[in-house]
Image (cartoon, grey):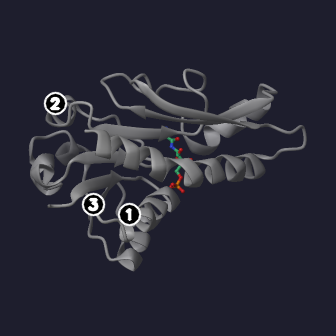
Amino acid sequence: MNKLSIAILASGNGSNAENLIRHFQEHPNIKVVLIGSNKANAGVHQRALKMEVPSVTFSKDLFNSPAVLQLLNAEKFDLMVLAGFLWKIPALILAAFPNRIINIHPALLPKYGGKGMYGTHIHQLVLANKEVVTGITIHLVNEIYDQGKVLFQVRCEVYENDTVDSLANRVHQLEYQYFPKIVEEYILSL
Ligand code: GAR
């Protein structure tokens, strides 16, 4: 049987992307086949190189044109996973992968979701608003930012003396713990 395959899109550091690659490295039925990014100098490319997974960069024009499906070799993978990817997914990619795009969001959606809500901006707001809990949401991607069907959420506490870094770190730990498992369960259910 051919392995089920995953393409990951990431805009930044790529620690979740690396964690996913590691998780599936020895998996009998699933593998990560490609990393795509909108930034040529994103840390995720170094991680892809280290983990021996090919990576590509696309411009906004390319990402929004039908050619992106060729660039990503879209017919060759089963699931697209967004791991810190900041651009909106265009309709033509959504149409090519109905219910086959998963995103991770570092907050408890619907709170702190929508355009411009990413990474440390979210943690700053959570602290400014004196929230006592936050967490992660793993969800399907649809045409509206952060509003696709929720697959999984888990909470963590926010402490009075938290900084953006300490909170980001706690949330990242949850992401590392749960994201690969949820992706695995989902792709196996397709
Ligand atoms: C992660 O915390 C992820 O949840 C978040 O970006 C971070 C990427 O970290 N995604 C969003 O904010 C999406 N709106 P990483 O590059 O180290 O994996």
Left or right for 18, reference 154: left
Q: How many marks?
A: 3
Left or right for 132, reference 16: right
Name the residue rendered at 54%, 39% in the picture. 118
Which disc number belongs to residue 24? 1
Question: In x, y percent, where is residue 79?
Answer: 26, 46
Name the residue rendered at 70%, 33% in the picture. 134
Q: Mark 2 points at which residue?
A: 95
| Above or below for 133 versus 36 | above
Left or right for 33, reference 27: left
The kind of residue on which mark 2 rests is Ala
Name the residue rendered at 32%, 77% in the picture. 52
Question: In x, y percent, where is residue 167?
Answer: 74, 46
Question: In x, y percent, where is residue 109?
Answer: 55, 25
- Between discs 1 and 2, the one toward the N terminus: 1
The quadrant the N terminus occupies is bottom left
Q: Is mark 1 on a helix, strand or loop?
A: helix
Q: Mark 3 points at which residue?
A: 29
- Between discs 2 and 3, the one toward the N terminus: 3
